[in-house]
Image (cartoon, grey):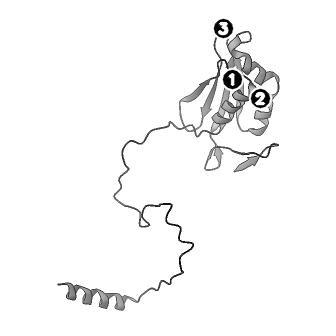
Amino acid sequence: PPTTTNTQTVQYKMATRGITQLQKLRILYCERGGSSRALREFLSDGHVVRFAERHPETQIEVLVRPGRHPFVEGLYKTQVTSHQVCVKNFEDAREVTKVCYMMANRSGRKITKITTPILTDTPSVQGIWTPFLNLQHEEPFEVSILPPEMVEAASTTSTSTTV
């Protein structure tokens, strides 16, 4: 369900059957490295606290890795693997915030490219949807259900005339 923030923007939380998929968000950074400056700003200015308040179901783990580049790692319920995003040399804390929300809005499933058309033994009765199927401006029409004896009589006359 969408939630609104102070700036009136709508943010969506990724959920499958009502369950948010992001279980844990790990933030790894260096206390002295220049590439971790934006991430340190993200932690010290309270951005991480605001993120945690908006996502109470997500655990946030902050780890220090001296001499290493920073990254954000998301652990999800749907996959055994995790997703990592490098936040090295980001300009400011807003970019790190965008990465955290991106991780929260993912389903956790691996993205696969569909290269071949999907074929099925049971095609849709409705047919393929196109944007030109807007039938709201068409005249209404009636559908009537025929009794079985009328259907049988119509089918026998149509087969005898076509032969």
Residue shown at the point (50%, 84%) measured from the top left: 142
Sort mark 2 into few (<14), some (14-19) or many (20+) by Cα contacts within 10 Å: many
Image coords of residue 95 (percent x, y) = 70, 28
Hey, what amino acid is under mark 2? Answer: Val
Q: Nearer the viewer, residue 57 or 161?
A: 161
Which of disc 3 and disc 2 is earlier in sequence? 2
Which of disc 1 and disc 2 is earlier in sequence? 1
Q: In the figure, is residue 44 to the left or right of 20? A: right
**Real-space Cα distance between discs 2 and 1?**
10 Å
Hey, what amino acid is under mark 3? Answer: Gly
Which of disc 1 and disc 3 is earlier in sequence? 1
Q: Which residue is mark 2?
A: 48
Residue 120, placed above or below residue 60: below
> In the picture, residue 160 is in which quadrant?
bottom left
Q: Secondary structure at mark 1?
A: strand
**Real-space Cα distance between discs 2 and 3?**
22 Å
Q: Which residue is mark 3?
A: 67
Say the numbered circle drawn on residue 27: 1
Q: Quadrant of the C terminus?
A: bottom left
Image coords of residue 94 (percent x, y) = 74, 29
Q: Are marks 2 and 1 in contact (CB under 8 Å)?
A: yes
> In the picture, residue 76 is in which quadrant?
top right
Hey, what amino acid is under mark 1? Answer: Ile
Q: In the figure, is residue 79 to the left or right of 95? A: left
Q: Secondary structure at mark 2?
A: helix
Image coords of residue 80 (percent x, y) = 53, 32
**Real-space Cα distance between discs 3 and 1?**
15 Å
Residue shown at the point (68%, 23%) measured from the top left: 27
Image coords of residue 79 (percent x, y) = 54, 35
Sort mark 1 into few (<14), some (14-19) or many (20+) by Cα contacts within 10 Å: many
